[in-house]
Amino acid sequence: HTHFTFSNYICSFRYLYMDMWLWAERNPRRQASIHPQPRASTAETAKGCGPSRWVAMDPDALALEEEVFQLVELIRSDDQDDRLDGLGALSELIEAAFGEDGATVGQAFRTAHGVPIIAWLTVAPSIDEQQQALMILGNLVSDACDPNSLLTKRLLLDDDGHRAILMATMQADDPSTLLYLCGCLQNLSDDEQWAHALAMAGVDTRLEELLQTHDDPRLVQYAAGALRNMQ
């Protein structure tokens, strides 16, 4: 995989990903996903964190895992340009992850403690960082991207990352940011615990407001899907 500089990545950002959220089968809730096809499973750690314990992990999977570790270090940087480069490259890597690669990326991201980092980047001062973080997180909490995405969802709750998501929900006002936010909320609310947490925090009221004030059909679709999941 090749690292994108942000200047190159943003050119494709608006065109490649504005239509990234697709309806997945309701089983039993609705999800939005960049990858509509089902994903194959791979070995997981007992609780989705800690050192990897892979079964017969091939060299390509090991290389993919190492790349994820390196990208998490980039998005952990104090330098905004480094974070943007890391986010752009991670977005590309996730978008290209098919089959077991999606599970490998998800597990490596959890092992590298990337979940709380990406969660708090959804409320970063930079709108570019917010959008890319929401896009990455929205994919990582989708079963269509990672068949073990429930582990990422639960880590968000356990590591207090849900507070960042709630802050993003209440603060976001940029149309593109709201689009990715609603797609992410739809995927998160596919989990019963997340649906309950979002409803208790009043996110349903915020989504209803967005339905009344925005006419982007994709935003409306994802917001309505999240609301249905929360019922």
Image: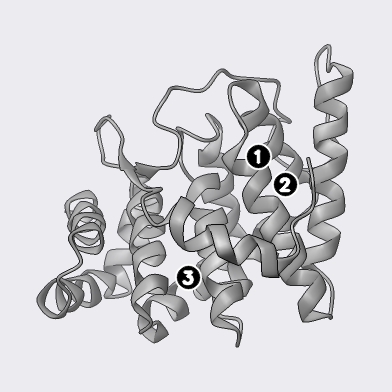
Instruction: Find residue 68 and report its horizontal and vertical position in percent.
Output: 79, 45
Three-letter amino acid code of the residue under disc 3:
Ile
Secondary structure found at label 2: helix
Secondary structure found at label 3: helix
Relative to residue 120, is residue 192 depicted above or below? above
Instruction: Find residue 168 and report its horizontal and vertical position in percent.
Output: 45, 77
Instruction: Find residue 47 and report its horizontal and vertical position in percent.
Output: 68, 37
Q: Quadrant of residue 199?
A: bottom left
Instruction: Provide the residue designation for mark 3.
Output: 165
Instruction: Provide the residue designation for mark 2.
Output: 109
Among the two numbered marks 1 and 3 on one chain, the one whose residue lies closer to the N terminus: 1
Three-letter amino acid code of the residue under disc 1:
Gly
Residue sitting at x 27%, y 75%: 202
Relative to residue 165, is residue 62 depicted above or below? above
Three-letter amino acid code of the residue under disc 2:
Phe
Q: Residues within 10 Å of mark 3 (few under 14, many from 20)?
A: many
Q: Is residue 72 visible?
A: yes
Residue sitting at x 58%, y 47%: 152
Residue sitting at x 89%, y 20%: 59
- Identify the coloring: one colour
Question: How far is mark 1 from mark 3, CA to CA?
Answer: 19 Å
Most extreme residue toward the left, as rendered? 212
Task: Identify the disc placed on residue 106.
Answer: 1
